[in-house]
Amino acid sequence: MIKVALIGFGCIAQSAHLPAYRVLQEKGKVQLVAACDIDRERFSNKMEINIGSAEDDNPMEFNKYTDWKEMLAEEEADMVDVCLPTFLHAKTTIELLKRGYNVLCEKPMALNYEQSTAMVEAANQSEGKLMIAQCLRFASAYTFIKDAIEAQTYGKPVSAVFRRMGGPPVRGWDNWFMDHSRSKGCLLDMHIHDIDMARFLFGEPNAVTCTTKDLYSGDDIVFSRLMYDGIDVLAIGDWAQEGTGFTADYIIALKKATVKMDSDGVTVYPRGGGAYMPELSSQSFYEAEIEFFIDTISSGAVNEVNSPSSAATTVKLIDTLRESARSGGSIVSFEK
Ligand SMILES: NC(=O)c1ccc[n+]([C@@H]2O[C@H](COP(=O)([O-])OP(=O)(O)OC[C@H]3O[C@@H](n4cnc5c(N)ncnc54)[C@H](O)[C@@H]3O)[C@@H](O)[C@H]2O)c1
């Protein structure tokens, strides 16, 4: 049984991590012993975002703190779950790793590659493990296409388009998402899901080009092209679409089929006809992600799915996209 303490009881903690701990606690794998938020009100106000809402029926029992150092002095925890705003990820995670804790830290890993490599270094020197919560790597709608590409079920991929669009997240604590110095805009915050997925599916691109538009925080609308040998990849990240609702989808063409994912699920369109929807696991991907991490802690297994250095490389790719955007969308090679 892994004992968990959580830092930052905001939207992602309440709407995604808490329901996951509830299920994993029922399975006897984990116990959420305590949570901390500098804003005590967060423990009584229900948060709701595009990925779900906090459940307040049958609330979970755990101790509540407003200072995480005090929390960790009082509580016995094997793992700390960092759900803080992005600008606090590197500093907090490094301190926790120095204290020997296993750390699950929300994505994006950090504000830039330099901070991310410092986190990898701290993990290498710690008794604790580090995992960055790149949740799509655990989502059945994405592991389906990952497995199909690896098994060459539909042949080699030739193109991919990823989209992730919605309204500006003005809901955050102290409006931190809308402050570019603390969130780095949609380019880092939301677009990273699809950029990480492109790397997960296709590996490292040779070069990239990117343009962005500034409407709220800066880098609010992002068009990225990743250049590979034989595969064209386009990713659109956009948090400037007020009122339209949230959309995330992909369409991937392979030699023998096209695979499409949208709010209806995954549909395979084989060349020659006979479209079908494969049956996928209905487990929440946040639950799958947290279960995976606690299993690696319990078993001591090496994390081959989502290593800290891979998460850092994804941040490096975002930095490279920003470099392209700052030079008006020029082609920039990606130093692997
Ligand atoms: N995986 C996903 O799909 C996903 C979705 C949303 C957010 N996120 C990420 O999760 C992280 C948090 O985002 P959020 O939407 O929950 O933000 P949020 O602003 O709703 O929550 C952050 C919480 O941290 C608290 N906090 C701030 N400083 C603190 C401190 N020093 N000590 C303790 N608590 C402190 C705030 O009071 C707030 O409750 C971000 O990095 C974000 O990018 C991931």
Image (tube, rainbow, N blue to C red):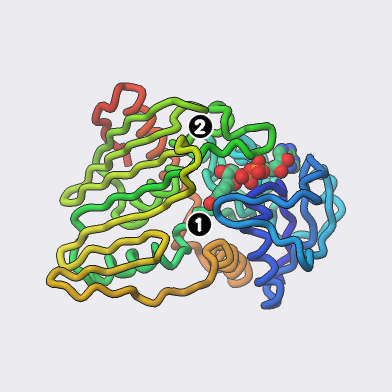
Q: Is residue 281 above or below residue 12?
A: below
Q: Which residue is mark 1?
A: 135
Residue hosting label 2: 184
> What x and y, as percent, mark residue 215?
46, 26
- Mark found first going from the N terminus, 1 or 2: 1
Q: Residue at x 35, y 51 (%)?
A: 199
- The answer to whether 313 is drawn above or below residue 216 in the figure is below
Ligand 1 is within 8 Å of the C-beta of the residue at disc 1:
yes
Checking the image for residue 125, the label placed there is: none
Give me the residue at 69% from left, 32% from top.
174
Which of the 4 image quarters holds residue 156?
A: bottom left
- Mark 2 secondary-structure assignment: loop
Residue occupying image coordinates x 53% and y 71% = 283
Q: Say which amino acid is labelled 1.
A: Cys
Q: Position of residue 103 (x, y in %)?
A: 64, 53
Ligand 1: give its quadrant. top right
Distance of label 1 from label 2 (alpha carbons):
19 Å
Give the class, few, some or many, for how many residues have Cα within 10 Å of label 2's Cα (few <14, many ≥20).
Answer: many
